[in-house]
Image (cartoon, helix red, strand yellow):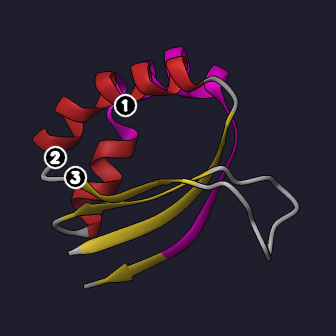
Amino acid sequence: MIERLVGLHVTDEAGYQAYREGMTPLLHAHGGDFGYDFRVAETLRSATPDPINRVFTIHFPDEAALEAFFAHPDYLAVRARWFDPSVSHATELARYHR
């Protein structure tokens, strides 16, 4: 299993929620799911100058499933409609196998 740890700066909670609702069926169709999901109140140290107020893990059965999901035209359409206007920064904090 491949897992990503991601930090975001969400600027529109309602838009980001619509993104999650729109992409989750496709995520599950690719064998993926979320493991953890946090709203961050305070960042004590960061390796990026970009603000982070949301941290989550997302996992897939393998790298091929991850790549297929993020390249899928339906995902890209949901991302363009909801994610891009509601998230100002996205930072991949880690990618690992477990």
- Is 18 rendered above or below residue 57? above
Give the magenta range: 71-94
Q: Which amino acid does label 2 sit on?
A: His
How far is disc 2 from disc 1 in space, using C-alphas? Answer: 15 Å
Asked which secondary structure carries label 1, the reply is helix
Give the camera-side residue of 4 and 67. Answer: 4
Q: Which amino acid does label 1 sit on?
A: Arg
| Mark toward the start of the polypeptide (2 vs 1) | 1
Viewed as shown, does residue 82 lie left or right of 31?
A: right
Q: Nearer the viewer, mark 2 or mark 3?
A: 3
- Numbered circle sitting on residue 33: 3
Which residue position is annotated with label 1? 20
Asked which secondary structure carries label 2, the reply is loop
Q: What residue type is labelled 3?
A: Asp
Residue 1 location (% of width, % of height): 20, 75
How far is disc 1 from disc 3 in space, using C-alphas? Answer: 11 Å
For this orientation, the residue located farthest to the front is 41
Which residue sits at x=70%, y=29%? Answer: 11
Badge 1 crowding class, 10 Å Cα cut-off, few under 14, some 14 to 19, many 20 or more, is some
Which residue sits at x=65%, y=20%? Answer: 85
Magenta stretch: includes residue 19: no
Viewed as shown, does residue 97 lie left or right of 57?
A: left
Viewed as shown, does residue 80 lie left or right of 3?
A: right
Which residue position is annotated with label 2? 30
Q: Quadrant of residue 23?
A: top left
In the rendered structure, are the residues bearing label 1 and label 3 in contact, judged by CB atoms less than 8 Å apart? no
How far is disc 2 from disc 3 in space, using C-alphas? Answer: 9 Å
Viewed as shown, does residue 51 lie left or right of 80?
A: right
